């Protein structure tokens, strides 16, 4: 019983001290906490990088998409395990839902 009383008194004493302790408000420095001049220099650096990178990316996209070339049509091998139809499709015919081209012409 004596051990529990001393533990209880210790906890109460700790709670009283914690209640009297001043509350410290800390400031969070999200970007490292440099001076305002360092922060502005860092911002200007990334602004310049962005202003150079965005037109470069747009130019690369225009170049790549403007050089469009036709792809060769390959014959589809007639393997026995491909496009196997064991029962009629709900809409009829041998055409799958998203098959277009020769299948739709028949």
Image (tube, grey):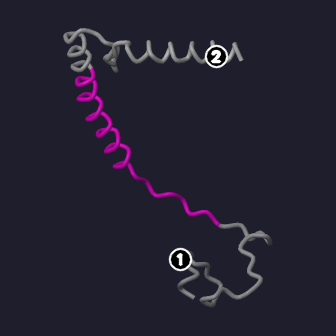
Q: Position of residue 20 (x, y in %)?
A: 37, 14
Please state, as top left, top right, bottom left or bottom right, where the C terminus lies in the image.
bottom right
Q: Which of the 4 image quadrants contains residue 50? A: top left
The residue nearer to you, when weighing 100 against 29, is 29
Circle count: 2
User: For the stretch drawn in magenta, what is the main secondary structure?
Assistant: helix
Q: Is residue 25 magenta?
A: no
Q: In terms of secondary structure, where does tag 1 sit?
A: loop
The residue nearer to you, when weighing 20 against 50, is 20
Q: Which of pointers 2 and 1 lies earlier in the amino acid sequence? A: 2
- Which of the labelled discs sits on residue 30, or is there none? none
Asked if labels 1 and 2 touch by Cβ distance under 8 angstroms, the answer is no
Which residue, given by chain and number where applicable, does mark 1 sit on?
Answer: 100
Q: Is residue 15 above or below residue 58?
A: above
Q: Report the side of 105 relative to 90 (left or right).
A: left
Label 2 crowd (10 A; few <14 / some 14-19 / many >=20): few
The residue nearer to you, when weighing 91 against 26, is 26
Q: Residue at x 60, y 89 (%)?
A: 91
Residues in magenta, as a range = 46-75
């Amino acid at each position: 019983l004596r051990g529990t009383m001393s533990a209880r008194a210790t906890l109460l004493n700790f709670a009283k001290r914690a209640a009297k302790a001043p509350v410290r408000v800390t400031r969070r420095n999200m970007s490292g906490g440099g001076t305002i001049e360092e922060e502005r220099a860092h911002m200007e650096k990334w602004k310049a990088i962005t202003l150079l990178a965005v037109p470069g990316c747009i130019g690369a996209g225009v170049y790549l998409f403007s050089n469009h070339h036709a792809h060769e049509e390959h014959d589809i091998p007639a393997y026995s395990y491909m496009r196997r139809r064991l029962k009629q499709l709900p809409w009829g015919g041998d055409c799958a839902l998203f098959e277009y081209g020769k299948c739709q012409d028949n």
